[in-house]
Image (cartoon, rainbow, N blue to C red):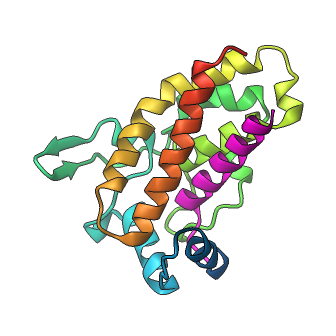
Amino acid sequence: MCEVEELRRTCDIAGSLLLKSPEQELIDWIKQCTGQNLAIKECQQAFYDYFCFPQSGLFCPPYNHVFSNGLRHGDIWQFPAASFDGGAEEEDFYQKFNFAPSMLNIKLPMVHKHVPGDHFGVELLFISCVLTNENLNTPDTWSILKGFICAHLPALKGYTHLLGSQTDPYIKVVAECLEECLSGLDYLLSIDS
């Protein structure tokens, strides 16, 4: 159960990194863990450029329905626009565990009043929610969770790889955290519950 709690925390951190602009506490934590001394303003700018603003030229859309339909031409990616109803497929999973993305404490720019339910950060926070003790004692939790992970892990792996190939140091830290999260999810899928 200790491994499950660690995975829950990792999913929570990884999901939050995709949904919240970094604050000084996070920058201090990164320095403590990695030795990297990152400037908060540059990290915040990277967050907005890579996760929020398609016009930045650096945007890596954190939405499953957008990333899955992206086209790669050499080193150049082309992505369609995000759909307002992106994440409609996730709603059944979310409802089974009373998870409402609209209730999350998300700090995105005013341009993003609505976050599609298939935002990778939302999906990771959902997994974190399901991995709480109260949900783990519910019948069928493991089979539902594994079904969700199997359906969404491939796109998240591709997205993590794309982030890992970027040169920005903050984005590389985010990719490393996502990589750790994915390793834990792969392990979870490999065990019988």
Q: What are the residue bounds of the magenta stretch?
A: 1-23
* One can see residue 55 in this view: yes
Picture residue at 49% right of the left edge, 30% below the top: 152
Picture residue at 48% right of the left edge, 85% below the top: 39
Residue extending furthest left?
A: 74
Question: Measured along the vertical axis of the image, is residue 87 above or below residue 24?
Answer: above
Is residue 155 highlighted in magenta?
no
Q: Quadrant of the C terminus?
A: top right
Relative to 139, 155 lies left or right: left
Is residue 21 highlighted in magenta?
yes
| Residue 70, percent from left and from top | 26, 41
* One can see residue 52 in this view: no
When asked about the image quadrant of residue 97, the answer is top right
Question: Measured along the vertical axis of the image, is residue 142 above or below residue 66?
Answer: above
* Residue nearest the viewer, comparing 170 with 100: 170
Q: Quadrant of the N terminus?
A: top right
Picture residue at 74% right of the left edge, 52% below the top: 103
